[in-house]
Amino acid sequence: MGTHMKTTIDISDALFEEARKLARERSTTFREVVERALRREIEEAEAKPRKPFKLRDVSVRGQGLQPGIDLSDRDQILELIYRRRGW
């Protein structure tokens, strides 16, 4: 299983007792019950398809790409940005 990290978690007393009882019934350890539950939760989360990222439109009074602007010319773009801000 590799290395282990010791940590502390806060869980309700009732849940702790249920997990300990389950461990005794299965002849295993409390630690193993917790690890199995965490693994199941992670596997379930990874199995769910994620929503594709959608960039929201935040343009303000834009008129699209202006003629004469070269998007590959970083200096020109910065000049236009800063000139409009009065810098």
Image (cartoon, helix red, strand yellow):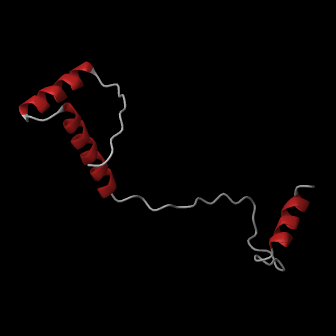
Q: Picture quarter containing residue 61?
A: bottom right
Q: Residue at x 34, y 25 (%)?
A: 10
Q: Is residue 7 left or right of residue 38?
A: right
Image quadrant of residue 28? top left
> Relative to 63, is 13 on the left or the right?
left
| Residue most extreme to the front | 3
Residue 60 sits in quarter? bottom right
- x and y percent of residue 79 in the render? 88, 66
Q: Position of residue 34 (x, y in %)?
A: 24, 36
The percent position of residue 13, horizontal first and vertical second, equals: 25, 19
Q: Is residue 56 above or below residue 63?
A: above
| Position of the C terminus by quadrant | bottom right
Q: Does 22 sit left or right of 71 as displayed?
A: left
Left or right: 59 as drawn, with respect to 29: right
Query: 51 above or below 66?
Result: above
Residue 5 vs residue 18, the one in the foreground: 5
Mark count: 0
Residue nearer the viewer, 6 or 37: 6
Residue 22 at what x, y percent from top left? 12, 31
Given the current orientation, which residue lies at the most extreme top position? 13
Q: Residue at x 26, y 49 (%)?
A: 1
In the figure, 37 relative to 62: above or below?
A: above
10, 62: nearer the viewer? 10
Q: Nearer the viewer, residue 29 or 37?
A: 29
Residue at 23%, 34% (x, y): give it. Answer: 31
